Amino acid sequence: MAAILLVFDFDKTIIDCDSDNWVIDQFGVAEAFERLLPTMPWNPLMDRMMEELHSQGRSVEDIAECLRAAPLDPHVVNAVKTAYALGCELRIASDANQFFIRTILKHHGLLECFSEINTNPSFVDEQGRLKIFPYHDFNTCAHGCSLCPSNMCKGMIIDRIRASAFAEGKKQFIYLGDGKGDYCPSLRLTEGDYVMPRKDYPLWNLISSSSQMLKAEVHEWSNGEELEKVLLQLIHRSISTDADRISANQLFSMDCKHGPVPASAAETISLPLPVPH
Ligand SMILES: [Mg+2]
Ligand SMILES: [Zn+2]
């Protein structure tokens, strides 16, 4: 089993567009959205827009159908499936919502690859209207992070994942994202982790202008094809480093049983493992 944990942003990382904007545009309510955006935060505004769609007679199934048409690069599908098959654990941290993400992942056969989807909760009420709520209830518990929007701090999500994952022996993070909201979690990564920002997007710009703040190694990508290539290279690199470590450990325990360690083997063990760059 690979001891690697992948955390994906969703919008403009897994899918090639922003799912909120996609739905707003496809249903022709972008004008109302833009008009209201200066007056309220994004998350409650999306809930408001779902109310608007419902009042226009759009069903939840109409919204699902719209989401299933959102563009998702086949290279990303392959990257997710391959990472899962290689034994990585995959999670999502996204400021979209459960309904949008689950509908899209299910449509592309990817839902089962993810062990956890951290995002804004949503449910369909008795009237058949989709309701969207903030991940952190900003009325009762402000998260106190100045980098993140009031409804979600992805850095806090990373800290929680780290606490539970490390107890299970997962050692290494690979974080993939594009947006401003992905900067805070990137800063929480440690040495030996990787961050994969989408080139020329806000996360990449923030990292480029403050790279000394980051402990994780940075590997950029521009499109689905590059995401697949870079991600699978990093996973294979981690797996082979892990395999080296395991074989060194096995050699060590074997030599303990069978007397003095030969000089060459002792050298193999005592040398620090190469840190990939
Ligand atoms: Mg994004
Ligand atoms: Zn934060």
Image: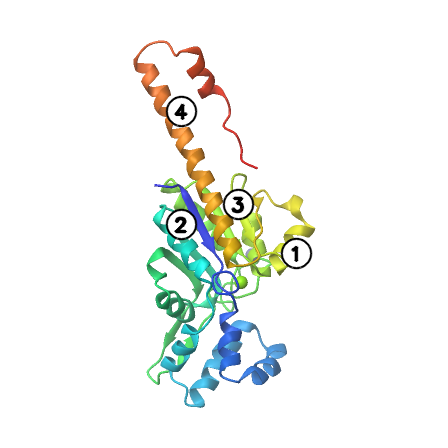
Residue beneath disc 3 = 194
Mark 4: secondary structure: helix
Residue 146 appears in the figure: no
Residue, x 44% and y 64% (percent of image)?
A: 119
Residue beneath disc 1 = 205
Residue, x 48% and y 65% (percent of image)?
A: 15
Residue, x 45% and y 58% (percent of image)?
A: 76
Dot in front, 2 or 1: 2
Q: Nearer the viewer, residue 110 or 45?
A: 110
Q: Residues within 10 Å of mark 2 (few under 14, many from 20)?
A: many
Residue beneath disc 4 = 248
Tell me the amino acid under the disc marked 4. Answer: Ala
Cα separation between marks 4 and 3: 24 Å
Cβ atoms at labels 3 and 1 below 8 Å apart: no
Tell me the amino acid under the disc marked 1. Answer: Asn
Residue beneath disc 2 = 83
